[in-house]
Image (cartoon, rainbow, N blue to C red):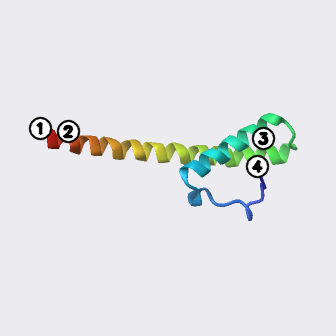
């Protein structure tokens, strides 16, 4: 995985699965302890941004499910 911004797609361009896979790869790479400090910091920052995006996407999905469930419950009453 490259850590240069020019070669890394923006987080918004990634699907949920792609973002999740990239975050898992970042964690494995950081845990390996093979990177220089600067590279580790760059990857850590990307990981935090990915995690923030994934959390937001999950919250949005949960809200949509709650709305749909509320509509479904309204139809059965």
Front-most of residues 24 and 45: 24
Give the CA separation, mark 1 to mark 3. Answer: 52 Å
What residue is disc 3 on? 29
Of labels 4 and 3, earlier in sequence is 3
Locate residue 44, reporting x and y percent: 72, 43
Badges 1 and 2: C-beta atoms under 8 Å apart?
Answer: yes
Give me the residue at 88% from left, 44% from top: 36
Query: Are the residues tagged 1 and 4 within 8 Å (C-beta)?
Result: no
**Residues at circles 4 and 2 in contact by the CB criterion of under 8 Å:** no
Whether residue 13 is situated above or below residue 67 in the rendered picture: below
Q: Position of residue 2 (x, y in %)?
A: 78, 55
Q: Is residue 1 left or right of residue 69?
A: right
In the rendered image, which residue does mark 4 sit on?
42
Q: In the displayed image of the protein, which residue is found farthest to the left? A: 77
Neighbour tally class for label 1: few under 14, some 14-19, many 20 plus, Cα within 10 Å:
few
Position of 38 compared to 75: left or right?
A: right
Q: State the mark number for residue 73.
A: 2
* Residue located at (58% from left, 61% from top): 13
Q: How far apart are marks 1 and 4 (CA)?
A: 53 Å
Residue 60 in the image, given as x and y percentages of width and height: 42, 47
Find numbered disc 2 in the image and state the secondary structure of the residue it sits on: helix
Left or right? Give the position of 71 relative to 39. left
Mark sitting earlier along the chain (1/3): 3
- Secondary element under disc 4, as helix, strand or loop, is helix
The mark closer to the camera, 1 or 4, is 1
Q: Which mark is residue 77?
A: 1
**Is 47 situated left or right of 52 in this image?**
right
Residue depicted at 24% across the width and 41% down the height = 70
Quick check: 66 above or below 7? above
Q: How far apart are marks 3 and 2 (CA)?
A: 46 Å
Circle 3 residues within 10 Å: few <14, some 14–19, many ≥20: some
């Amino acid at each position: 995985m490259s850590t240069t911004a020019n070669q890394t797609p923006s987080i918004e361009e990634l699907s949920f699965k792609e973002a999740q896979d990239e975050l898992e790869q970042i964690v494995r790479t950081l845990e390996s302890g093979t990177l220089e400090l600067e590279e580790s910091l760059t990857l850590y920052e990307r990981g935090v941004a990915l995690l923030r995006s994934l959390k937001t996407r999950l919250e949005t999905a949960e809200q949509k499910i709650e709305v749909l469930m509320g509509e479904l419950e309204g139809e059965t009453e």
